[in-house]
Structure formats: C-alpha cells, structure tokens
Amino acid sequence: MGAFQSSPGQPEYVDLKEKTGFSISQIRVLHTRFKLLGHNGETLKRDHFNSIPDLACNPIRAQIIEAFFDRRNFRRNGEGPVDEIHFEEFLMVMSHFKAPSPRMIEERESVRREKLRFIFNMHDTDDDGTITLEEYRHVIDELLSLTEDLGKDTAKGIADAAMREVASTSMAHMEPDEFFEGITFEHFLKLLKGFEIELKMNVHFSMMDTPTFCK
C-alpha cells in the first residue's frame, strides 16, 4: 500500500469513512495521532508504540501492540504478522474500538462479535482458532507480572485451574479420557455471554490528545 496523503473530504478519507464507520473529523484526529506516533513518517513499527506512556502500565501491552500488526485485524481476511503498517491498517485496527451507534440497536450484536473476535485473536497467538492452555498460561503470566510476590508456579496453578473451569463450562459432557484442547471462538462467545463488550471497548476521541490504555 502506498503512502496516505489525503486531506479530510478527499476521496481517500471518504473511502475510509465507508470502510470503518468513523466520521471525517474522527479520521482526521486519528491521522494526527498516527503521524505523531510515527514522527511524521508514512508507516508505524512496533517500536513506535513505546512512545505511548500509558501503554507501559498495561499488563497485556505486548498483545495490544501485536494486534496492530496482525493481518486478521485489517478486515481483509488475511493471516500472519506484518513488520509495519500504513495509516489505513492503523485505522482498520482502531475501528474495532468504535462504539456502536445508539440509534442502531440491530448492529450491537455484530459489533459485539467483532470486538470479541479481536480480543480472541490477541490471545490465539499461533492463529489456529484455539486459545490453548499454554497461550492461556502466558496471558495469566502477563496479568500477574506486576504482582512480585506471585511466583511462576502460582501463576501456572491459577491458569490451570481457570482452564479447567472453562472446560467444565464449555464442554459439560466431556468423557473422562477426553482431552480439552483449548477455547474455540464459539466457546469464547458463550463464556462472555451477557458481557457488554460493545459498550466498554471504545475509543474516546475527547481523550485522544492523551490516550489512556490502562482503564
């Protein structure tokens, strides 16, 4: 993809508005943020995200950054990681944080599913359609990394216990000799049924000058 040099109101911005659902003014704000992060360059690399101070305090910082370089999140049915992203890819990833329109009740379920797929992809690191026990342990390690008095064995025990709970919830009729391979996306949807992620996982443009990823 070539350099993105459009101004608000030009065809490229209008095209991105259609693809993402962001308004022209929101695209302008995000383009400013993109240029600031990339020091006015045409692409972003992983290192550029290190300049976001509030991201440093997030225990799943690595997964958040990686999500911006995962083709699955570009809305193009791609797979695998990339080394750098242009503004359109950045905007496509950010569109997963767009709030549903309050007037469009019927779109809430589809927005909810997209947001949960985005979160699922963050933890399905090998892109096999399943969050395995090992991947889940890694998530627990990341979440507990700021708690110095918890050792690796404790974190492993918490992850194993949580996965057993997931297995009992997702596959209530497992045979004694059946091995639980991990959480599929359909299991993931069931586990988070009733959790209104579509109302919580949103970008706030009024705070875009000082983005916060820890809340």
Image (tube, helix red, strand yellow):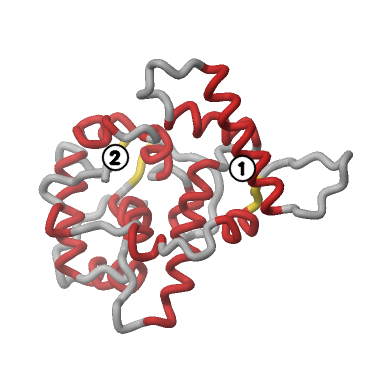
Residue 102 rendering spot, x and y as whole percentages: 29, 78
Residue 133, above or below 116: above
Q: Nearer the viewer, mark 2 or mark 1?
A: 1
Residue 20, above or below 81: below
Residue positioned 36% across, 69% down in the render: 19
Find disc 1 in the rendering and name its residue: 131
Identify the secondary structure beneath mark 1: strand
Find disc 2 in the rendering and name its residue: 44
Is 114 left, or right, of 25 in this rendering? right
Is 215 left, or right, of 127 in this rendering? left
Report the front residue among 133 and 6: 133
Report the front residue among 19 and 160: 160
Residue 36 rendering spot, x and y as whole percentages: 14, 42
Is 43 left, or right, of 172 in this rendering? left
Disc 1 crowd, CA 10 A, few/some/many (<14, 14-19, 20+): many
Q: Three-letter amino acid code at disc 1?
A: Ile
Q: Quadrant of residue 41?
A: top left
Residue 197 rendering spot, x and y as whole percentages: 41, 60
Residue positioned 55% across, 38% down in the render: 125
Q: Three-letter amino acid code at disc 2?
A: Leu
Q: Earlier in the sequence, mark 2 or mark 1?
A: 2
